[in-house]
Image: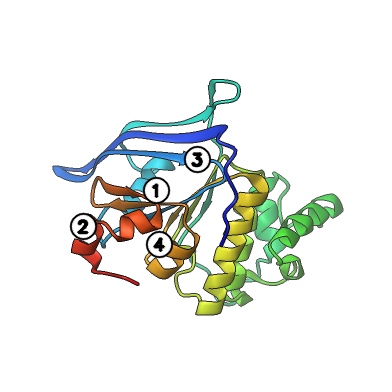
Amino acid sequence: MSKPVACGLHCTKIKNISVKFGKEVVLKNVNIHIHCGELTVIIGKNGAGKSTLLKAILGEVEHTGSITFMDIKENVTKKIKIGYVPQSINIEKHMPTTVYDLFASCICHIPVFLKKDKKIYQEIKEQLKIFGAERLIDKSIGDLSGGELQRVLLAIATKPHPNLLILDEPVSGIDKTGTEDFYELVNSLKAKYDMSILLVSHDLDLVKKYADKVILLEKEVIKEGTPEEVFKSTEFVNRFGVIN
């Protein structure tokens, strides 16, 4: 598969991120550069600190180090805009909240129990359309399949367009077809909007197929590079074995 070339004018710099829970070191001096138009995937064994790193970037756990967004074209540091799709959200199966209700509550201050705003409704529908999910706008959240819900969450996370899109094992519990579809969506997203995307995944076959850069994490970065470079490395083979 040919991959689009990133413009190289924007970069999210994760510098010396460390996290401790009490005396336990969870992350140690993690340094990652995430470039625009690229999919960077974090892999590692359970307990390697993958989710903690995402929480640190999102500001949800106390940490040392810094996260900065560089506009290299203008040679300035800007406040980073982050979009986030979690691994899962707690949803009651029969909750009456619709996709419109959820989306509108995220992008405007109008109470969702009031009459639908036609302008906002159309705006949401257009955003959902990018992800092939416009037909879901009036559907109850509890009635969505795993794949449908992830498309909706992806649409919400990318409005407005973030500098960095973070995806925490976003296809967990989704079937193989839905998983492949999701990765295709992400692939088109980075190309169309020149977006930096950071994804945590356990599916090494799809990582090999779609990632531009892979980070092998074990409390610290122990190997990084292209999928081929990382998967053939001693560091990877010692932990995961050889993959085809």
Q: In whole angstroms, how far apart are the C-alphas of marks 4 and 2? A: 20 Å
Q: Are marks 4 and 1 in contact (CB under 8 Å)?
A: no
Task: Tell me which numbered mark, 4 or 3, is placed earlier along the sequence.
Answer: 3
Q: In whole angstroms, how far apart are the C-alphas of marks 4 and 1? A: 12 Å
Reading the image, the residue beneath label 4 is: 201
Q: Nearer the viewer, mark 3 or mark 1?
A: 3
Residue drawn at point x = 82 percent, y = 55 percent: 122
Quarter of the figure with residue 151: bottom right
Would you call the spot at circle 4 few (<14 residues within 10 Å), some (14-19), or many (20 or more)? some
Classify residue 1 as left or right of residue 127.
Answer: left
Task: Tell me which numbered mark, 2 or 3, is placed earlier along the sequence.
Answer: 3
Task: Tell me which numbered mark, 4 or 1, is placed earlier along the sequence.
Answer: 1
Does 184 appear above or below 114?
below
Would you call the spot at circle 2 few (<14 residues within 10 Å), some (14-19), or many (20 or more)? some
Task: Tell me which numbered mark, 4 or 2, is placed earlier along the sequence.
Answer: 4
Q: Which element carries disc 2, helix, strand or loop?
A: helix
Q: Which element carries disc 4, helix, strand or loop?
A: loop
Q: Nearer the viewer, mark 4 or mark 2?
A: 2
Does 8 appear above or below 119?
above
**Dot 2 amino acid type:** Thr
Give the number of the disc on residue 54: 1
Q: In whole angstroms, how far apart are the C-alphas of marks 3 and 1? A: 16 Å
Residue drawn at point x = 62 percent, y = 71 percent: 148
Q: In whole angstroms, how far apart are the C-alphas of marks 2 and 3? A: 26 Å
Reading the image, the residue beneath label 2 is: 234
**Dot 1 amino acid type:** Leu
Total numbered circles: 4
**Dot 4 amino acid type:** Ser
Reading the image, the residue beneath label 3 is: 35
